[in-house]
Image (cartoon, rainbow, N blue to C red):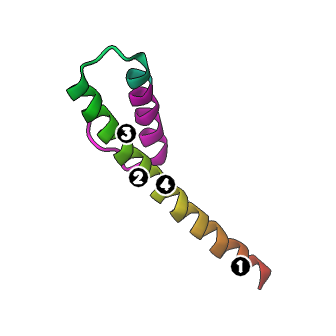
Amino acid sequence: MKKKPTDYDKAMAQLESLVDRIQQGQMGLEEMRSEVKAALELIKLCRGKLRDIESDLDAIFQEEEE
């Protein structure tokens, strides 16, 4: 797997690429296992980024209401 991205958009692009490769089904089981593990790590990263953004937006909206 490529270097693990820290940016949401880069992580999503890498995840989409991995999903495309997995769906093509033209890899061995070991490679597929590795790709699925990499995809799961990217999903975790993206979910964390989305939670952080949601939290930031909640704080911004709460400040606006005060």
* Residue annotated with mark 2: 45
Q: Within 10 Å of the Cα at label 3, are there few (<14), some (14-19), or many (20+) other Cα atoms? A: many
Residue 43 x %, y %: 43, 47
* Boundaries of the magenta span: 1-19
Mark 4, mark 1: which one is toward the viewer? Answer: 4
Mark 2, mark 3: which one is toward the viewer? Answer: 3
Magenta span: chief secondary structure = helix
Q: Secondary structure at mark 1?
A: helix
Q: Give the CA distance from mark 2 to mark 1.
A: 26 Å
Q: Secondary structure at mark 2?
A: helix
Residue in view at x 49 percent, y 54 percent: 47
Above or below — where is 39 with respect to 25?
A: below
Q: Quadrant of the N terminus?
A: top left
Q: Within 10 Å of the Cα at label 2, are there few (<14), some (14-19), or many (20+) other Cα atoms? A: some
* Residue annotated with mark 3: 39
Give the numbered dot on residue 62: 1
Residue type, mark 3 in image: Ala
